[in-house]
Image: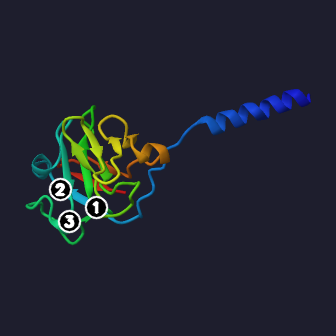
């Protein structure tokens, strides 16, 4: 009986401790709200298919002609909007989770189709694996990109990026 109980406990501990999880919650919780009210706005500023991407940083007016309003919030470091391999829009905070500073932002390496931190060199999979770290300190520390939700399309073809 003791052997069975000991074996069961060991098996349970093995199962619960062997699974590695990624911390994608290193970025401070700040407001996120970007509205694409209709299909025309989405077609102009959104993403259509992989590997499309866009950066949204309200404080720097990126993109310069986007119709930002008082109710637009672009997260901690800005928003990276991509269309993943299934052509589904996905949004991430641009702040590197290793650095956790709003002015150290990831960018897309167009050749490797990965998000990269210019400071620590960490690379992230934003097109296939939801911001999962691929290399650099982010892998060692198990830090993934902060994800946001993309709601839509609504009946007018619009989308909203939010928490």
Q: Position of residue 127 (x, y in %)?
A: 29, 37
Residues tagged 3 and 1 counted as in contact (Cβ below 8 A): no
47 horizontally vs 104: left or right: left
Mark 2 sits on what residue? 37
Foreground of the two, 89 or 27: 27
Comparing labels 1 and 2, the label whose residue is closer to the camera: 1
Q: Nearer the viewer, residue 156 or 28?
A: 28
Specify few, some or many for label 1: CA neighbours under 10 Å numbering under 14, 14-19, or 20 or more.
Answer: some
Find numbered disc 1 in the image and state the secondary structure of the residue it sits on.
strand
Which quadrant, please, contains the N terminus?
top right
Q: Is residue 7 above or below residue 47?
A: above
When the figure is inspected, residue 55 is found, relative to residue 30, above or below; the finding is above
Q: How is the image coloured?
A: rainbow
Residue 18 spot, x, y in % from top left = 61, 35
Q: Residue at x 15, y 52 (%)?
A: 38
Circle 1 residue? 33
Residue 115: x and y in percent read 28, 44
């Amino acid at each position: 009986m003791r052997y069975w109980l000991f074996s069961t406990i060991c098996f349970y501990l093995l199962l619960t401790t062997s699974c590695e999880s990624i911390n994608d919650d290193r970025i401070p919780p700040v407001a996120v709200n970007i509205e694409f009210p209709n299909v025309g706005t989405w077609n102009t500023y959104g993403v259509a298919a992989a590997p499309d991407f866009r950066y949204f940083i309200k404080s720097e007016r990126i993109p310069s002609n986007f119709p930002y309003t008082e109710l637009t919030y672009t997260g901690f470091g800005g928003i990276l909007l991509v269309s993943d391999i299934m052509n589904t829009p996905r949004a991430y905070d641009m702040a590197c989770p290793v650095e956790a500073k709003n002015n150290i932002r990831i960018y897309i390496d167009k050749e490797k189709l990965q998000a990269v931190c210019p400071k620590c060199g960490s690379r992230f999979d934003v097109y296939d694996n939801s911001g999962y770290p691929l290399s650099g300190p982010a892998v060692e520390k198990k830090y993934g990109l902060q994800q946001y939700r993309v709601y839509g399309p609504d009946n007018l073809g619009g989308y909203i990026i939010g928490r």
